[in-house]
Structures are given as structure tokens and as C-alpha cells.
Image (spheres, rainbow, N blue to C red):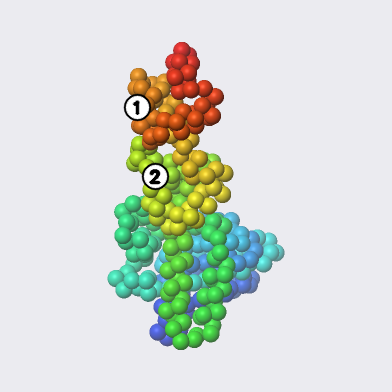
Amino acid sequence: MFFSYKDIFRENEKIAMRYSIWVPGKLEVHTHDFFEIAYIVKGNGYHFLDTSKHTIRTGDLFLLTPDSKHNFRPDGGSELEWINCMFLPDVIDPGLIGITGTTDLLKSLIFFDSFKYDTTNLSGIELLSSIEDLNKIFKDMIKEYDKRLAGYQDALKNYLQILLIKIFRAYYVQSMQPEGSDQPGLTNLVTAYLNDFSLRHNVNINELARQAFYSPQYFRKRFRNESGVTLASFIRQKRLDAACELLVDTDSSVNCIMEQVGMNDAKSFYAAFSKEKGMTPAQYRAKFRQQ
């Protein structure tokens, strides 16, 4: 089954919304010539996408590209409801007309530093209950679409841009978590940042937050919720761990090591080290070099 945007979209529209409820035998495996964001509002079931079968539940989201073959089906006798946001890519940027992958679509939203984000050959995105506050956004979009008040397509475009930023943000942070890792994405993002820019330098919270598409204040809050510690505590721990390695593996002075790990106040460094390790840096070096 194939759906053309000409059959779905109203005249002069580039964004269409639909609230769908699964009915036996009504929806078959299908493709379409437009992008689609499908958000599961209610129920559990399965999403059949190309040759894969994915378990789905309330809160899951799929960004689907043109020509993807897919279908939804509930689990057993349960209900399944979802909202579709269907759009043509040139509503975001006229230069995107005719594209069929998400790479250029997402890069158009983050063009200022898209080279930092790995979106190579990215055809679609699946996010499982990983984005907050989407329910209200989708329902507000449905209201805009149904009421058709003046400027409703412009309003929908603004909502769509917010959705795509949230989707990319969640995808990027999720991709920072290696397979099998217990560490949350933001923890890996901060670790990678420290590795790239050296512990010697001050951490730029604005840069970290920008990479995750959060405000600095929300980044700190989200980091603490994910990791269980404050950002400052996490960075201090990384500095102390690095200091321990240098104490054992090098002959550098304690003051030199302190500066190498970015802790420039001797009093604070000695206090933090002693509290964390239960001994002074010199005692730590003497103890572990003997082993």
C-alpha cells in the first residue's frame, strides 16, 4: 500500500496531523512519499519497520523517512493509539526538497556545528520513551490542525522544529551511550569532553550544554538526575582519578600533577584528595608504588 502526500495533505499544506486508533484489518504495511513522526499515545504493541519488528509502548516515537515500509499492531487485545505528524522536508528548508533521509533534515537545524554530530547515513530514528513532554506538543498540534485558524501551518512549522530538535537531542545523547554501558548519555558526553579538551583546562558549561541542546541550568539538573551526582562532583572525581594515575605512573611533583589535572588551588586539592582517598597525595604515591 502506498500513500502519497497529495492524498493525505489538504490543499497548500506541507504539514498534516492525524490521530489514529488501530482497527483490525484497516491498516496494512505501507510506504509514503513524505516524512512522518509517529508518537504512541496509548497502548503496547509492535512496529514493523522494513524487515525489523520492534516492541512499542506508550511514549515511544519514530521518525520515519519516505519509502520506509512500516505498520503498527497492538499486543494481543490491547488498544493502540498514536499521533502522526506528516510533513514535506522543504517546510523546514526550501533547499531540502526531494531528500529522503534524516541526515540533511537534522543538519539543517544544527548547521552551525553539524560536523560535530554523527548523522552519516542516518535514515530513521527510533526513540523509546526517552523524550519528556511530547504528549502535550502533539496534542496541541492536533488542535492547531483541526481548528485551521489563521497561520496554523506556520504554528505547526514552529512545533515541528521544536520536535525535531528534541528528537535530535535525544538521539545524540542516547548515541553517546556505548552498547552495554550502564553510564547515561550525558555522563559519557562529559567524559568525552574532558578527554578531548584535557583536564588541565576549565570546563565550559555553556559549551557542554550547547552540545546537548540544553540550557546550562537544565543541563546541570538533567546530569544530576541521570548520574546521581552534581556535575561539579563528577568533574572533581575525574580530576582526582587522573591525579592518582599520575602519582603512580610518573615522577612529577604533586604540585605539577595538581596543575595537570586542572586543580590550581593547593589547599582545595589536598583537602579533596585526602577526603576522597583517606591519605595525602604523597602517602598515596608511596603506598601504591610499593605494590
Report the front residue among 158 and 124: 158
Q: Is residue 62 above or below residue 235?
A: below
Frontmost of labels 2 and 1 is 1
Separation (CA) of disc 2 from disc 1: 19 Å
Tag of residue 137:
none
Q: Three-letter amino acid code at disc 1?
A: Cys
Residue designated by label 2? 203
| 96 relative position to 153: left or right | left
Question: Seen from this angle, which residue lies furthest front?
Answer: 267
The answer, for residue 68, to whether it is visible in the render is no
Q: Is residue 116 above or below residue 68?
A: above
The answer, for residue 266, to whether it is visible in the render is yes
Residue drawn at x 61%, y 69% is: 81
Dot 2 or dot 1, earlier in sequence: 2
Residue drawn at x 39%, y 73% is: 88
Q: Three-letter amino acid code at disc 2?
A: Val
Tag of residue 256:
1
Report the front residue among 146 and 242: 242
Q: Quadrant of residue 251?
A: top left
